[in-house]
Image (cartoon, helix red, strand yellow):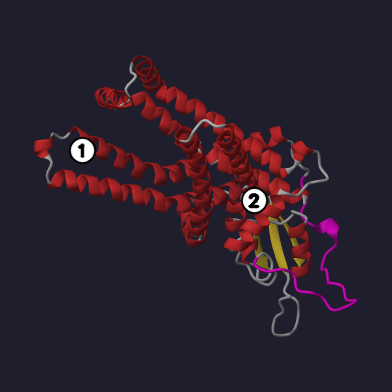
C-alpha cells in the first residue's frame, strides 16, 4: 500500500464513463479492478492533485499483486461499495458484435490511420515489385536492383509497424468504449511504448502457429510421398489429430494476449498466463457464454469473411487453374502454363480492391476481442 511522508494512505479519484468516484485507497481500487469496475484505460488522479493520468499508472494496482495483509487485519476502505463504479451487466454475443460495429464506426478515422501504417508500405512494395517484372531483361540495371531493395525495405517496415498496429487497436478501442476521444498521434505515441513487448509476443505466438502449420504440411507430404499402406494412413491421421489438438489448445491459451500485454501492461510471461486463465474461465456458465467459445466464434466469423473475400478476388485465377488442371497431365507443363497465364493477366484491379477492403475491415476482429475481454473481465 502506498503512503506519503506522513504515513497517510494515498487516495485516488477515478473517472469511469464520465463520472468520478472516490477518493479511494489502493485496496479499494484493487477490489474494483477484480470486479471489472476499473480498467487500465480509465482516467485517475490523486485526490490532492489535478493532473489526470490512467489507472494503469497507479503504483501497485495493475503492475503487481496486492501485498499480503497481516494476520487478522483487514484492508482499509475509504468508501463503501455503493459508491463504486457500476458493474455493467454481461452482454450477449449479439450485443458484443453490435458494440464492435459501434466502436468501429465511431473511431473509423483512427482505425483507418492505423491500417494505413501497415498497408501503405506493403502496397508500395507490391507496386514496385510489379514494375520490376515489366522491365525488359536488357534494362535490368541498378534501377531494378534499387527497386527490389526498396520493395524489401517496405516489407520490413510494414512488419515493424504490425506491433504498433496491434497496440493501437487495443488503445483506441478501450478509449472509445469508455466514451473518450483520443488523438491519433497521442495514441500512436502510447502504442510505440509497447512495441518491444508486443513484437516479442508476436514472434513467439505467430512463430508457434507457423510451426504447427508446417507440421501439418509435413504430414501431408508424408502421405503423398509415402506408400499407401494402412499403417501410413493411421499414423498420418494420428499425427493430424495431434496437430489439430495442439493448434486449438494453443489458440485458446493466447486468446487474450494482446489485451493483457497492452491494456493490463503485463509482461510477456504474465500476458500468456493471464490470457490462458481468462480464456478458460467461466466454467460455471453455459458453454456459449464462456470466453473460450465466444472467442472461437469471433475468429471463425472473421475467417469466413476472409475466405469469402479471397474467393471473390481469386475466382478468375481459380477457374483458369481448374481448367488447366483438367486438360494438362504433365505437372511441369501445368506449372508453366499457370505462370504464363498469371503474367499475361497482369494487374487485377478488382482483386487489389477486395484485398484493400479486407485490410480496412481487419480492425473489427481486434475490436471484437477487446470488447469480449472487457466483458469477460466483468464476469470474473
Foreground residue among 320 and 31: 320
Residue 137 percent location from the top left of the image: 12, 36
Dominant secondary structure of the residues highlighted in magenta in the image: loop
Please tell me which of labels 1 and 2 falls first in the chain. Answer: 1
Q: Does residue 304 show up? A: yes
Q: Residue at x 72, y 51 (%)?
A: 377
Residue 183 vs 269, above or below: the answer is above
Residue 119 percent location from the top left of the image: 39, 41
How many numbered marks appear?
2
Residue 208 percent location from the top left of the image: 53, 51
What residue does disc 2 label?
Answer: 253
Residue 127 vs 354, above or below: the answer is below
The Cα atoms of the two marked residues, 1 and 2, are separated by: 43 Å
Q: Residue at x 17, y 43 (%)?
A: 144
Q: Taking 252 as reference, is 144 left or right?
A: left
Q: Does residue 101 show up? A: no
User: From which residue to which does the magenta span run?
Assistant: 63-88
What residue does disc 1 label?
Answer: 132
Q: Residue furthest bottom?
A: 6
Crowding at dot 1, Cα within 10 Å, few <14 / some 14-19 / many 20+, comes out as some
> Of discs 1 and 2, which sits in the foreground?
2
Q: Taking 233 as reference, is 340 left or right?
A: left
Residue 235 percent location from the top left of the image: 59, 39
Q: Residue furthest left?
A: 138
Residue 131 vs 329, above or below: the answer is below
In the rendered structure, does residue 67 fall within the stretch colored magenta? yes
Q: Taking 325 as reference, is 291 left or right?
A: right
Query: Could you tell me which secondary element the residue under label 1 belongs to?
Result: helix
Query: Could you tell me which secondary element the residue under label 2 belongs to?
Result: helix
Foreground residue among 345 and 261: 345
In the rendered structure, does residue 248 fall within the stretch colored magenta? no
Q: Taking 353 as reference, is 245 left or right?
A: right
Amino acid at each position: 500500500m502506498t503512503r506519503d511522508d506522513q504515513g497517510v494512505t494515498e487516495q485516488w479519484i477515478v473517472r469511469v464513463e464520465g463520472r468520478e468516484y472516490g477518493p479511494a485507497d489502493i485496496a479499494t481500487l484493487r477490489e474494483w479492478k477484480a470486479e471489472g469496475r476499473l480498467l487500465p484505460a480509465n482516467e485517475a488522479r490523486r485526490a490532492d492533485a489535478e493532473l489526470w493520468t490512467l489507472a494503469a499508472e497507479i503504483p501497485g494496482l495493475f503492475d503487481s499483486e496486492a501485498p499480503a495483509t497481516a494476520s487478522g487485519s483487514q484492508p482499509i476502505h475509504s468508501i463503501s461499495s455503493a459508491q463504486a463504479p457500476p458493474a455493467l451487466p454481461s452482454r450477449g454475443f449479439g450485443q458484443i458484435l453490435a458494440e464492435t460495429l459501434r466502436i468501429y464506426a465511431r473511431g473509423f478515422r483512427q482505425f483507418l490511420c492505423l491500417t494505413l501504417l501497415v498497408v501503405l508500405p506493403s502496397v508500395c512494395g507490391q507496386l514496385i515489385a510489379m514494375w520490376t517484372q515489366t522491365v525488359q531483361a536488357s534494362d535490368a540495371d541498378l534501377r531494378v536492383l534499387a527497386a527490389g531493395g526498396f520493395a524489401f525495405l517496405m516489407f520490413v517496415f510494414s512488419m515493424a509497424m504490425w506491433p504498433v498496429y496491434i497496440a493501437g487497436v487495443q488503445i483506441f478501442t478501450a478509449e472509445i468504449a469508455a466514451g473518450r476521444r483520443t488523438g491519433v498521434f497521442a495514441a500512436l505515441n502510447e502504442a510505440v511504448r509497447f512495441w518491444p513487448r508486443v513484437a516479442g509476443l508476436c514472434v513467439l505466438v505467430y512463430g508457434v502457429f507457423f510451426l504447427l502449420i508446417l507440421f501439418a504440411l509435413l504430414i501431408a507430404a508424408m502421405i503423398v510421398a509415402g506408400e499407401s499402406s494402412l499403417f501410413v494412413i493411421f499414423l498420418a491421421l494420428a499425427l493430424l489429430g495431434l496437430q489439430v489438438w495442439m493448434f486449438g489448445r494453443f489458440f485458446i491459451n493466447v486468446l487474450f494476449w494482446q489485451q493483457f500485454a497492452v491494456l493490463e501492461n503485463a509482461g510477456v510471461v504474465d500476458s500468456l498466463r493471464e490470457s490462458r486463465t481468462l480464456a478458460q474461465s467461466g466454467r460455471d456458465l453455459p458453454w456459449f457464454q464462456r470466453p473460450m467459445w465466444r472467442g472461437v466464434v469471433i475468429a471463425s466469423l472473421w475467417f469466413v469473411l476472409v475466405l469469402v473475400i479471397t474467393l471473390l478476388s481469386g475466382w478468375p485465377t481459380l477457374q483458369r487453374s481448374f481448367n488447366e488442371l483438367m486438360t494438362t497431365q504433365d505437372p511441369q507443363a501445368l506449372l508453366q502454363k499457370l505462370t504464363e497465364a498469371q503474367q499475361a493477366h497482369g494487374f487485377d484491379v478488382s482483386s487489389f480492391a477486395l484485398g484493400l477492403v479486407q485490410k480496412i475491415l481487419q480492425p473489427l476482429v481486434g475490436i471484437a476481442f477487446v470488447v469480449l475481454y472487457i466483458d469477460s473481465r466483468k464476469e470474473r
